[in-house]
Amino acid sequence: MNTDTDTLDFLDDESDAGATKELVWRLMIVDDEPDVHRATTFALSGIRILGRSLQFLHAYSAKEATALLQSETDVAVVLLDVVMEREDAGLALVKTIRKDLKLSEVRIILRTGQPGYAPEIETIHDFDINDYKTKSELTRTKLYATVTAALRAYEQIRKLDEMAFYDRLCSLPNRNKFIDLSDERLSASRSLDDVIAILDVDDFSEINDALGHQQGDRLLQAVAERLKLELGPEVILARIGGDTFGLMGPSRILDPVTVLSLFRSPFTVHGDSMVVTASMGLTQNLGNGVQGRDALKDANIALKLAKKNRRGSFVMFSTEMGTDIRERVRLLQALRHAVESERLFVVYQPQINLRSGKIVGVEALIRWRNEDSTFVPPDRFIPLAEASGMIVAIGDWVLRVSCLEQLRLKTLGLPDIRMSVNVSQIQFRHPEFLTKLSAALRDTGINPKHLELEITESVAMEDPGFMLDILHRVRAMGISIAIDDFGTGYSSLSHLRQLPIDRLKIDRAFVTELNHEVLGGHIASMVIELGRNLNLTVIAEGIEDAGQAQTLLNMGCHEGQGYLYAKPLTSQQLVQWIQAHSDTP
Ligand code: C2E
Ligand code: MG
Ligand code: MG
């Protein structure tokens, strides 16, 4: 044993933890009986949990607790007496914590002297209460176990929130956070002289291919570092995409000539000196209730134009930049035509049980083939179909075609597999969605237990009340639900645990990351762990090599999908693929 650490542990018990640099867990005891405060701190004295010592905050009424929670930060656990001034004082405080103070991370352990005051199950669920104990269960061992479990949960929630808002590669806010931060700044109306800009590293994918993604990662870190240092604290800096950074700040600092001149001297990357250029799209005039999200869209239109012009240049957005809109109108007309002339079809990508290697399902993916046999990628036309409302009809068609395909496989004597169909948010919000869904079930005759709907994480987290209701109804029909692109949106654990879902789909980006030196699959393993805790199956998408599959399997991931197994296949290819793969053990 290291004696230095032992001494430190000892000192920590005595000293005010705020004065030391060591990390502590902050626990708040809320109880009107001073004895309970004493007994609790005594029972937990000198204990370290998950590598940290404990620090206590004390409140003797719900009012005191509310005030403390408003002024203090990082409170991890509240040990809360149910019955204080009034019989329901404790539960009222729980509501205040979650609803008014909007503290969703703090873990709550309810305690009562009278066993009869146990809250309803729904209350425990709705307000995300971690545990319920009678005060006779306040022995040192029991308290230790309860608090440890709560701290573990707290740590996990913190990590999840961090993941939703933070880019770990460059230690910067991510796109979601950038939008939040810019909205904050816009609404504080300190921003009349501000600009919002997107900076894109030129030819980054070529650099990545030529030098390897490790070198690519390091280059991005070096760029982030320089921008942070040179632009200073007045500028909000975020990594909003693979090789793009979002910037918001005073126009005198974000003058594009000055910003781009930061790329004149080379970046030192792992001993090598690399010269790169960047392009910028900017937007100004941020008054009049502009939202961060819209400003980013404008900046992006400007960026695209800058990229078209010449590497290393910039363009300031102006409202006349209608080229993008004209292009959309053209594409939309072509899509209408494609629907009418039946140029859309559905392909199916196998989903595999990672342990047995057997097929468990397929994901239906739409395709649009032009007359000249080139394809328009769904990422290009789905957003358009959504914006124009056409997705409702197209989505209904995909659903029916996919259900029929599931049945066709069965009539060919192949084993029953799950059919996963992507559902866009516009479809989901359509008032007739449920009617159409049950009509599709009825008309095709598919067994609903073989049908799964994929909704993206951002959709699932939006407007939780509405989503919850509709998801419950879908589930009641016997259909299962998967959350697509998981890890890219704003998941709050408390929402997630309320959602009636069956599967989490780890976004491809986090599978690709498994091969990266810096990130090393942290997020993938966290999602898998999260799935385990919530009793959900976890499927990884975009598996391209056997190493990734093995790592995921070792992490406890159940299912996988990706080019390693099969690309999306036409109906005919799918049958052949299944037949070819059902003989292998
Ligand atoms: P998604 O639902 O996340 O689908 C997975 C995407 O990853 C598919 O792209 C698939 O072809 C691709 N993929 C699968 N394995 C690999 C791999 O190993 N490596 C790489 N690099 N890519 C892989 P796809 O078909 O281009 O679809 C893109 C997106 O378009 C889908 O993302 C989905 O959001 C949307 N989409 C496709 N079909 C439909 C549909 O019928 N309805 C709706 N609403 N959206 C659809
Ligand atoms: Mg999908
Ligand atoms: Mg996906």
Image (tube, rainbow, N blue to C red):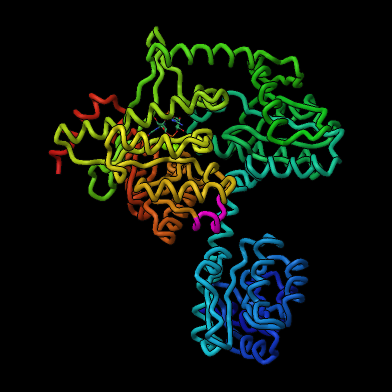
Q: Is residue 464 above or below residue 40?
A: above
Q: Is residue 49 above or below residue 165?
A: below
**How would you classify the magenta stretch by its main secondary structure?**
helix
Q: Nearer the viewer, residue 406 or 360?
A: 406
Horizontal and vertical percent position of residue 30: 68, 79
Q: Which residues are magenta?
A: 491-498
Q: Is residue 415 above or below residue 146?
A: above
Position of residue 274 in the picture relative to residue 559 (left or right): right
Which quadrant of the render holds ligand 1? top left
Residue at coordinates 23% horizontally, 34% vertically from top-left? 407
Q: Nearer the viewer, residue 508 or 100?
A: 100
Residue at coordinates 72% horizontally, 26% vertically from top-left? 264
Q: Based on the picture, tell me whether residue 112 belongs to the magenta stretch.
A: no
Residue at coordinates 48% horizontally, 14% vertically from top-left? 336
Residue at the outermost bottom position = 35
Position of residue 556 in the picture relative to residue 512 (left or right): left
Horizontal and vertical percent position of residue 507: 46, 41
